[in-house]
Amino acid sequence: MLEKEHKIVPKNYYQSLWMLLGMAAFGLPIRAAFCASIGNMAFLSIGLPIGMVIGLAMGAGMDKKALKEGRQLDVEVWN
């Protein structure tokens, strides 16, 4: 309820969320494009770490913005 109505989030909320989204939204297309461009399926796993790093960077930026705006709780939630 806090996140949906008031945009108040715990520590590292966006970083965790965007790590998964980065792997799915960026990693899989990068992987497919890379394997198709070189014609070798041996590099099938190269897109996931790239997508994870992109997602972590985006999430860290959003967490920093939430902290700056005072919307971040001093609690870390483990899922």
Image (tube, rainbow, N blue to C red):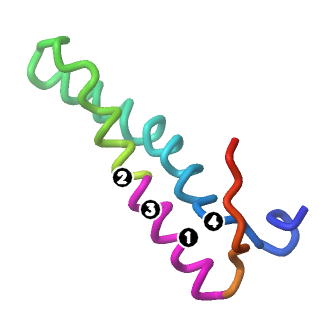
Q: Nearer the viewer, mark 4 or mark 1?
A: 4
Is 3 positioned to the left or the right of 64 in the image? right
Would you call the spot at circle 4 few (<14 residues within 10 Å), some (14-19), or many (20 or more)?
Answer: some
Residue 44, position in %: x, y? 25, 19
* Residue denoted by label 4: 11
- Verify CB contact (< 8 Å) between mark 4 and mark 1: yes
Look at the picture and state if 72 lies above or below 45.
below
* Quadrant of the image containing the N terminus: bottom right
Q: SS class of the residue under badge 4? A: strand
Kind of residue at disc 3: Met
Q: Marks 4 and 1, Cα distance to the nearest angstrom?
A: 7 Å
Question: Which circle's residue, 4 or 2, is located before the other in the chain?
Answer: 4
Q: SS class of the residue under badge 3? A: helix
Q: Nearer the viewer, mark 2 or mark 1?
A: 1
Question: Which circle's residue, 2 or 1, is located before the other in the chain?
Answer: 2
* Residue denoted by label 2: 54
Q: Nearer the viewer, mark 4 or mark 3?
A: 4
**Residue 8 magenta-highlighted:** no
Q: SS class of the residue under badge 2? A: helix
* Residue denoted by label 1: 63
Kind of residue at disc 2: Ile
Kind of residue at disc 4: Lys
Kind of residue at disc 1: Asp
First to last magenta residue range: 56-69
- Residue drawn 55% across and 80% down? 65
Residue 33, position in %: x, y? 24, 29
- Verify CB contact (< 8 Å) between mark 2 and mark 1: no
